[in-house]
């Protein structure tokens, strides 16, 4: 509601994200925001209104995963936002019908079918498009794209829609919103079938430029306030108003140049709008409406992991993590690792999956520390992975690596074409065929399959409090970022073998796009499995546990079979 302050200037409430997005207003804007932050009513509505005002006669498009979602949920909220700005249906725009001829003559594109179109008084049009019906956008040319609830939009379908963003640079190229995008959503959960394609824009943000934009917008805001105060006087000074008007034009031009071609990515929680939502609303969601996993994602805007009770590595937690560098950042060479004994051999665990996954650890007394992980994605292969390892551990003095790996690494051993021999040779000899000084001991020759139920039970013992005969486990969270993510995101499911229930690791994540495998797939956790599920530790785990978790004898026996 409007109020009056002591200077008789209108004051209207807007939550901090409204102010921030209005001020920054870059060419590309991505807002990942919690529930109740008015993503459609505030961000999408205000950005689309600015596009219409700044580029009269231009064509734009609102896109969603489905047309029903767009028409029934998104656009009504956007229209409410327009209404709050004074843009009224039937006066300033019409939807789904042919507009007056005076409006049509101002439009820069030819529109034959208005059933899925918003038409504005200044000739601008907004096409409604959906990714499940590509024909709605076929042949269109627009100068700005709006995506709402973007987490439901598949990456491949989004990429197919992008070519319509081309427009007319001669007519509209001066606007900082030309060829831009406005993307809003709440936090996606990739593990639940949602999509995070818009996170690629986070790396495009120039934070220093955003700071400059905010400073310039604050300066312009001060001038605008001063202008309103002068206008509110009984006899405003024309000279003062003209001076302030020149200042406003100066800052508007400066902001246009600062914003043009820039990207702004913001991730905010529902607390940004707490004055309107109230703490009681948040408390209700936390105490019963939403379970903790959903609350963290949808309200706090936290990237979701997997609920602890659904994890395969259910006991893995903060007590198993450490940071093994003095800088508390990722190491570039092994010399920076504080918990490495460079005069002792290294252990390695390797998985030959959709990506090559390699983890390196070392035991010191009663502690076992996983120190570093490496990976390679197709088409890069053993040579590149070995080069990573050799470069990082070049200063390691005891150049012995005991390598544990997937049973599949032994396939075609007789023909000397097995993967285990290939990675051994790649580490022992450089790209030029010269000896590196490393000796690789292949520790998994002749091993049988490691069943998933045996892995689950073993990890319960290794990560539990009663580990007699086993070392205490620690994983470097900075240098094994992919491993930690893989273990925290690995999901468990119950399957039946006859009438017996067994716990399995869900492996669907290994079919994701290649670029998503390092952080999201279970491949790296499998490399860790081979590293720690060695014969002597499995035997110790079978007899050490007192918590009722027993490693089946058959699992150990199977592992120790020589085939």
Image: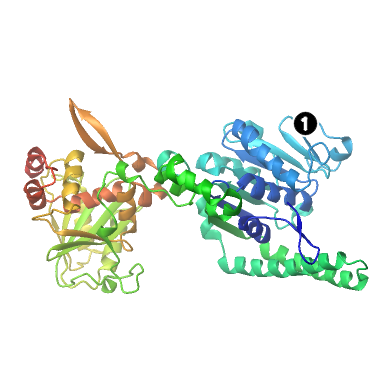
Measured as percent of width and height from the top left, residue 387 is found at: 29, 63
Q: Nearer the viewer, residue 325 or 406?
A: 325
Kind of element beneath mark 1: loop
Judge whether residue 167 can be spotted in this image: no
Residue appearing at x 17%, y 66% in the figure: 438
Residue appearing at x 51%, y 59% in the figure: 203
Above or below for 434 versus 114: below
Q: Residue furthest top?
A: 498
Task: Examine the image and state in which quarter residue 2 appears.
Answer: bottom right
Q: Nearer the viewer, residue 179 or 363?
A: 363
Measured as percent of width and height from the top left, residue 347 is found at: 17, 60
Residue to which mark 1 is pinned: 112
Task: Examine the image and state in which quarter residue 400 appears.
Answer: bottom left
Above or below for 499 versus 17: above
| Tally of numbered discs | 1
Measured as percent of width and height from the top left, residue 14 is found at: 67, 55
Above or below for 311 versus 480: above
Measured as percent of width and height from the top left, residue 260 is found at: 68, 61
Q: Nearer the viewer, residue 453 or 174?
A: 453
Residue appearing at x 13%, y 42% in the figure: 548
Q: How is the image coloured?
A: rainbow
Residue appearing at x 69%, y 46% in the figure: 45
- Is 458 positioned to the left or the right of 291 in the image? left
Image quarter hosting the C terminus: top left
Disc 1 residue crowd, few under 14, some 14–19, many 20+, Cα 10 Å: few
- Is 150 positioned to the left or the right of 513 in the image? right
Judge whether residue 489 can be spotted in this image: yes
């Amino acid at each position: 509601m409007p109020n009056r302050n002591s200077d008789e200037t209108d004051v209207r409430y807007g939550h901090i994200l409204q102010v921030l997005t209005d001020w920054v207003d870059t060419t590309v804007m991505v807002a990942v925001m919690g529930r109740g932050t008015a993503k459609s009513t505030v961000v999408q509505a205000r950005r689309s209104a600015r596009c219409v005002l700044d580029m009269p006669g231009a064509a734009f498009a609102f896109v969603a995963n489905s047309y029903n979602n767009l028409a029934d949920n998104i656009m009504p909220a956007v229209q409410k936002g327009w209404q709050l700005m004074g843009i009224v249906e039937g006066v300033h725009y019409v939807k789904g019908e042919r507009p007056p001829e005076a409006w049509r003559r101002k439009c820069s594109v030819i529109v034959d079918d208005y059933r899925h179109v918003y038409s504005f008084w200044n000739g601008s049009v907004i096409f409604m498009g959906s990714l499940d019906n590509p024909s709605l956008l076929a042949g269109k040319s627009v100068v700005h794209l709006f995506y709402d609830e973007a987490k439901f939009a598949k990456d491949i379908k989004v990429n197919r829609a992008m070519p319509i963003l081309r427009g007319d640079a001669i007519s509209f190229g001066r606007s900082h919103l030309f060829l831009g995008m406005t993307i809003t959503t709440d936090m996606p959960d990739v593990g639940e079938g949602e999509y995070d394609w818009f996170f690629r824009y986070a790396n495009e943000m120039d934070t220093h430029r955003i700071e400059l934009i905010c400073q310039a917008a604050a300066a312009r805001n001060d001038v605008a306030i001063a202008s309103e105060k002068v206008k509110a006087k009984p006899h405003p000074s024309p000279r003062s108003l003209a001076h302030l008007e020149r200042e406003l034009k100066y800052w508007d031009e400066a902001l246009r140049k600062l914003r043009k071609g820039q990207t702004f990515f913001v991730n905010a929680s529902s607390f940004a709008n707490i004055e309107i939502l109230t703490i009681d609303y948040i408390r209700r969601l936390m105490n019963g409406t939403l379970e903790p996993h959903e609350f963290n994602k949808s309200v706090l805007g936290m990237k979701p992991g997997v609920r602890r009770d659904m994890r395969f590595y259910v006991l893995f937690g903060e007590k198993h993590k450490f940071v093994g560098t003095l800088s508390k950042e990722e190491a570039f060479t092994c010399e920076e690792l504080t918990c490495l004994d460079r005069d002792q051999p290294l252990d390695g665990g390797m998985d030959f999956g959709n990506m090559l996954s390699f983890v390196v650890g070392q035991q010191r007394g009663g502690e076992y520390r996983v120190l570093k992980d490496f990976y390679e994605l197709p088409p890069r292969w053993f040579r590149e992975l070995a080069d990573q390892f050799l470069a990082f551990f070049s200063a390691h003095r005891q150049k012995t690596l005991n390598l544990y790996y997937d049973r599949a690494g032994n396939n075609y051993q007789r023909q000397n074409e097995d993967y285990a021999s290939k990675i051994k040779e790649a580490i022992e000899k450089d790209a030029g065929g010269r000896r590196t000084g490393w000796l690789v001991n292949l520790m998994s020759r002749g091993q049988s399959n490691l069943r998933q139920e045996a892995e689950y039970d073993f990890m319960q013992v290794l990560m539990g409090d009663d580990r007699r005969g086993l070392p205490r486990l620690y994983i470097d969270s900075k240098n094994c970022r992919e491993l930690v993510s893989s273990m925290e995101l690995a999901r468990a499911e119950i399957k039946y073998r006859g009438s017996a229930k067994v716990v399995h690791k869900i492996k669907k994540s290994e079919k994701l796009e290649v670029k998503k495998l390092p952080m999201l797939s279970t491949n790296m956790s499998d490399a860790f499995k081979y590293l720690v599920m060695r014969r002597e530790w499995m035997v110790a785990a079978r007899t050490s546990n007192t918590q009722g978790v027993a490693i089946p004898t058959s699992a150990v026996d199977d592992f120790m079979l020589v085939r």
